[in-house]
Every structure is written in structure tokens, then in C-alpha cells.
Amino acid sequence: MRGRFWGALRGCGLGLLAGTLWFLVESVGNRVAGGVVSGPTLRTIAAIDVGLGGVAGLLLGAFFPRGGVQLGLAMGAAYGFLRVFEPPGMGAEAVFVLAAAATLIVGGWIARRDHFGGGVLAFVHTALLGAAAVLVADFALDAAHASALRGLRLPILIAALPLLAVLADWLIGLVVRRRTLRFGLEVAAAAIVLAVVGKPLSTAPLENRVVTAVPPPKETPDIFLVSLDTTRADHLSLYGYQRPTSPNLEAFAADALTFTQARSTAGWTLPGHASMLTGMYPSRHGAHLAGGWLPGQSIDGRRNVAFPLAEDKITLAEGLRDRGYTTGGFVANFSYLYRDYGIGQGFQVYDDAPGLLLRVRPPAVRFAQKFVPGFCLKPYRTAKDMNRLVLSWLDQVPPGRPVFAFVNYMEPHQPWLAPPPFDRWVWELPQAGRLVTKDLYTHEVKHFSDEELAFIRANYDGQVAAMDAALGQLIAELKARGRYDNALIIVTADHGELLGEHGFVGHMGRMLYEPLLHVPMVVKYPGADHPRGRIDTPVQTLDVTPTALTEAGAAVPTAVQGEPLRQVTRPSLAEEDINPFLVSEYGATYDRAVRVFFDGPWKLITTSHGQRMLFDLAEDPQEGNDLAATQPDRVEDLARRLEAEMSTMVATAEPTKQVN
């Protein structure tokens, strides 16, 4: 008993050391893989790793009092357990424990045959091998979109990995007998590999100080464009929603024009924002899904599926910069607003850094999320973060020139888990405690229970309310700085979100129903006598660019298809092409391009497979009654008009590989 007591104490000390090693391996791996973690979050992860390592070492040290390879292997098993832990059931965990026990038996056999099987060096060596094996495999699973390995394969694989790493080291030991030399060679080899293949991500803002030499006239207005990413109009109290999700937007709208029939040109970030910032439809500006795989990866390591905005397209920022504006872009959506996709064109400062990008995800983070679901969940910077950045930039702008600031908020975007105190609607639900750790985001078309839908929508609404609070703070700060009265302020969204309607949740790749396309549009024009009220004329996000350029006294490029918001006469369209990832993972449901045409209350949806759906939005806003079969003449008329509009688009690129 005395030996086990001292073994446990020794194990606790070695466990603290192992936790430190876990954190170092995770941090280095994440950085070289292009991940980004803030200092406070790093310190929290370090504390969790070291703490869990100490607890695991205390428990395991009693069984392996001599330490060395066996205790190091046991710590590798403990590290793997953090990865597979998935309450409330314990089936996979039980399988993991049995598999890990088997690996420890084999590990004991190795220890007896390894001349350096004991001691701290052997422990450190083995603990590092185990942690590296688990992390490399987990990174590979994530890269292959196989992180949710089905059945018992995941726990068995994770349990075997530390042993496989030790076996590989043992085989090397047949040639290099001295453990110190072997350890040094393996560390050096790993360092060389990481240096060669590593791609650390720069988070410094893009800076291009080019500006026209002559400033515009003195009374030229400032322009602020706020994009409420993933925000559907019908979940805003401004548009009649029953929950008070947008009190600050309502207060702002009282001094502005509210467009009740504003729609996006697309159902996801890149083409929606590109239309907002060029005044063109996706087929003309070219920043849209390719319909096939493209070379390279996105910032988060996904295979590329979309064309960037080409350099020859003139953006709103470029037009205003050439008018003499100081331009700044501050985006929370680092996925498809990242600089690689061309949206930063024309901004003298463009800040697109991730809030949190765990390219290598520590098992301790996964473990902690089972108890604190919001920990390291949201990868995007908060709306408060974006306010701080844009206001700091604004305070440093030299006097004498107007400013154009583009601000992107991301709160309503999945993952849906509203932060306190905006989670009050969530905790009013009796099933919230059961669902809070359940990932309900899926690309599958499925039936959601009433409880699941209520939970999804309560979280979404809470996140919208959190974003609205930040918007109110931004407006207040503009007033305090004297930049409100003579400013054009546009608040809109790139697209909305499906929250269970028609069996869909999310946005990209879904059918273009109204929750995706109907977005807010609130515009305050400059001057004391600016117009106020509600306007029912159909408008779109591509009307933002000609509106802003006109108010600034800048030329509107001839390629612009939008019109100033108070003068829109053209019909509304929307587009979406094929996402090859969704096709490969979910099949025929996503293997279609979609085009939409609006004519008053009538909405025609067509697909590349010849499907046509017709809805009367005045009588059927939920789009539950397809009238295509009963009104074939109207369908044909709208389809001809849609084809005529699409024929004016200019294709800019072709996919490199078609989807099979």
C-alpha cells in the first residue's frame, strides 16, 4: 500500500509534466497547421491540460509506480480517453478502456525488453509519442471529414494509437539502441517535418495606404455598411417577430428607411457579400460556387469549392477609395470573407483574423465542452470585438477625408449557442439541459422534433439579440464621435438561415427558400432632412453599392446591375451553384444549381434538373403550397423572364472538375 501511495504521488508529478507536454504538442501543432488561438484561451487550455494530466497521473501512478514506458503509455491512453469521452452513454468509453488495457499489456512486454524502460526520460518519450499519435490521427480525421467515426472504430483506433507509436519507436530502437539518441533524432525529425510542411497563419490586417491625392468636397458623407451575417428578416422584432430580438435596430430604424422586401442574391456568404460590394449578381461578379473542386484549400483547411472575386471587378471600397475616402474593412467571418477570396479589394485596412481557429483540436477542449458547451465553440470574433476594432481605426483616421467602414458581425451563424444574458429564451425550455451538448447542425434533410426546433430557434434568437446590442453600441459611439448625422448608414445581411423549415437547417447548399433570401435592410441617409419610414418596394443587397456611390458623388461602374435603393425598378433574382462537398457527402439532394425569380408576390424556383416550383408569397409566406402544376402559364412566363435576365450575365470562370 505504501508503494502505491508514493507511486500515486510520483505519478501526479509526472502527470503534471505530461499535461505540459500535451499542451506544448497541441500548441506547436496548431500553429504550424495554420491555427490561431488567443493568449487567454491558450492559458485556459494549458490549465486544463496540466490539471487533467495531474489527475490522470495520480490515478494511474498507483498502478504503475515505477513510471517509465508503462506509465507513459497509460498517460497516452488517458489522453485518448479525453478524445472519445461522449456522455451520457458510456458504451464507446467502455470499449476504449478494454482496448487501452490490451495495449498496456503489450506495452508492459515492450518495457521489459527495452533497456531504458524506466525513468523520467522513458516516460517523457512515451507520453510525447502517445500525444503526437492521437493528435496527428485526429487532424487527419478532421481533414477527411471523418471526425465522427461511426460505431466502435473510433475508440479502438484512439486506444491503439499510443501503442502503435511506441511500437514504431521500439523498431527504431533495434537500430538506435540509446534512448537519448533515439529521442533526440525523433524530435529533430519532427521539427524538420513541421518546418517544411508548416503554414503558420498571419493575422495582421492587410494594409494598402493608396488614396487619391485630392479629397472630395467637405460635406461628402461618411459611409458605414454593417453586415449582419446570417440574419433572416422574419426573426427580427423590427419585422414583426414576437421576441424582442432587435430593439436597437428598431430604434435606429425610427430615424431611417426600412425596406420590408429586401432580398439577398445568394444563400451564403461569399456571393452574397460580393454582390453587396460590387452591385452585381453572382454570375457576373464570379465569386460563387464552382460546381466542382478547385485547387487549394480555404483558411480552415477545407478543399476549395468557390471562385474568389476577380481583381478586375470594381468594388465599392475601390470606388470610394478613388473618390478620396479612407476605407476600412473589419470582418468577423474569416471563412469566406478572408483575403484569399478577394473581398478585401480597395480597403486600405482589412482586418479578417479568426477569433479562434483550432486546426489541431486538443482532446481537453472536446472534454471540457461536455461540461461547458460554450467553451471554444464560436470561432468568430464577437460583435463587440469588431466594434472595438472599427472604433479604434476610426479614431486614428486623419482629418479631412470621409471614411467608409465595412463591419461584419457573425453572432447568428452556427454553431447555435446563445451567450448569457441572451440565452434567457433557451433556458425557458424544459429540454434545454438535455440538448445543450447535442450538435443539431446537419446537412441532412430530416425531420426535427418540436423540442429540437424550439431549442435551435431560441439560441438563434439569443444570438441575434446579442448582435443587436453591439449594433446599438456602435450607433451610440458614432453619435458620440459626431459621425452620425452626416453619414449614410446601411444595415443589412448577406443571407438568412433555415431553422428547420422544409427539413433544412443552415444555409449554404440549401434550397433557396425565403428564410435564406429575405434579409433586413435599414438605411439612414445623411443630412437633417433625410427620409424615414417603411418602403415595400422589392430591393436587393446588390443595390447597396450604387446607393453608396451615388451618395458619395462617385461614378457608378457600367457593369453594376444594382440601382440606388430608392429608385429600384428591376426584378429580383437569386442564384446558387453546386457545392461538390455536399454532393459527395449527402448525395442527390444537393446535386443541383438553383435560380430564383421574383415578380411581385410570385416566386419561381428552378433547378438545373428541370424542377420548377411556384409560390404566392402573399398567400403562402411559408412556401408550403407549390402552384407550378396549377399555373403552368405563369411558370412559363417567369421562366422565360428569368432566362432572359440570366443571359445578360457574364461567365468569368469554369470549374476544374465537374461533380459526378
Image (spheres, rainbow, N blue to C red):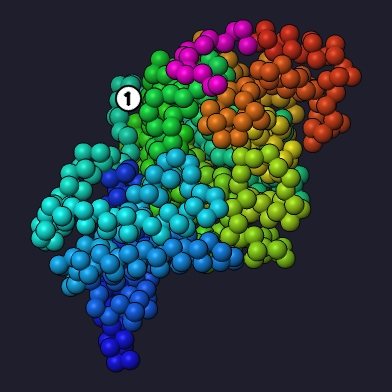
Q: Relative to 589, is 366 on the left or the right? A: left
For the question of whether residue 301 can be seen, the reply is yes
Picture quarter with the N terminus = bottom left
Q: Residue at x 61, y 31 (%)?
A: 587
Figure quadrant of residue 126: bottom left
Q: Which residue is mark 1?
A: 211
Q: Is residue 82 above or below residue 342?
A: below
The prevailing secondary structure element of the residues shown in magenta is loop
Q: Relative to 385, is 396 on the left or the right? A: left
Residue 386: give x, y in percent of width and height: 45, 46
Q: Is residue 124 magenta?
A: no
The foreground one among 139 and 598 is 139
The span picked out in magenta is: 646-660
Number of callouts in the render? 1
Q: Residue at x 32, y 34 (%)?
A: 206
Q: Residue at x 33, y 21 (%)?
A: 212
Residue 602: give x, y in percent of width and height: 80, 22
Q: Determine whether the residue tagged by mark 1 lies in a helix, strand or loop.
A: loop
Q: Residue furthest bottom?
A: 2
Residue 102: give x, y in percent of width and height: 40, 65
Q: Residue at x 28, y 67 (%)?
A: 109
**Label 1 amino acid?**
Val
For the question of whether residue 490 can be seen, the reply is no
The foreground one among 414 and 16 is 16
Figure quadrant of residue 598: top right
Q: Is residue 215 above or below residue 389?
A: above
Q: Is residue 652 magenta?
A: yes
Label 1 environment density (alpha carbons within 10 Å; few <14, some 14–19, many ≥20): some
Q: Relative to 642, is 191 on the left or the right? A: left
Picture quarter with the C terminus = top right
Residue 456: give x, y in percent of width and height: 66, 51
